[in-house]
Image (cartoon, helix red, strand yellow):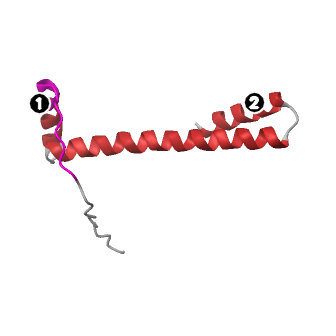
Amino acid sequence: MKKHSLKIRTRPSRMVSIRIPERTLDSLKEVAGHKDMGYQALIKFYVGQGLRADLATRHSQRVIDATTRILHRHLKSPRKVVSIVKEIRKVAR
């Protein structure tokens, strides 16, 4: 069986300062302790997760918008375009 090694990429970073409510910070520290990591690493993890989710949503919307424009160019019926786009959204969930 092949062993996988963890590769850590270092990327340029910048120091930022944010205010976080004390209770939220206490909760972050508690959760981080249970995950055996530092609270600052947990904050970066949460920010990264949220950012990736938002970027994926934006990308999906751009694809749907482009699909809609292309369908309007190729199909005669606006109703058919709406129907197809609704079906795409339903299947893509």
Q: Is residue 4 magenta?
A: no
Q: What is the secondary structure assignment of the residue under circle 1?
A: helix
Can you give x and y, in whole percent of width and height, for residue 53 in the image?
Answer: 43, 41
Magenta span: 14-25
Q: Position of residue 23 (x, y in %)?
A: 13, 24
Work out whether residue 76 or residue 26 is closer to the camera in this orientation and state it: 76
Q: Position of residue 91 (x, y in %)?
A: 65, 38
Q: Residue at x 41, y 45 (%)?
A: 52
Q: CA distance from mark 2 to mark 1?
A: 48 Å
* Label number found at residue 51: none
> Is the C-beta separation of discs 2 and 1 under 8 Å?
no
Q: With respect to residue 77, does 41 lie above or below?
A: below
Q: Which residue lies most toward the right here?
A: 76
Hey, what amino acid is under mark 1? Asp
Tell me the residue at 58%/36% (across/down).
93
Name the element at disc 2. helix
Extreme-bottom residue of the structure: 2
Please name the predominant secondary structure of the magenta segment in the image: loop
- Name the N-terminal-most of marks 2 and 1: 1
Q: Which residue is the site of mark 1?
A: 26
Relative to 3, residue 32 above or below: above
Above/below status of 51 relative to 9: above
Q: Nearer the viewer, mark 2 or mark 1?
A: 2
Magenta-span inclusion, residue 19: yes
Position of residue 89 in the picture relative to residue 8 (left or right):
right
Q: Which residue is mark 2?
A: 82
Instruction: Look at 79% across and 38% down and name the residue there.
Output: 72
> What amino acid is labelled 2 in the image?
Val
Name the side, left or right, on which 85 lies relative to 52: right
Spot occupied by residue 66 in the image (x, y as percentages of width and height)? 67, 43
The one nearer the camera, 39 or 17, is 17
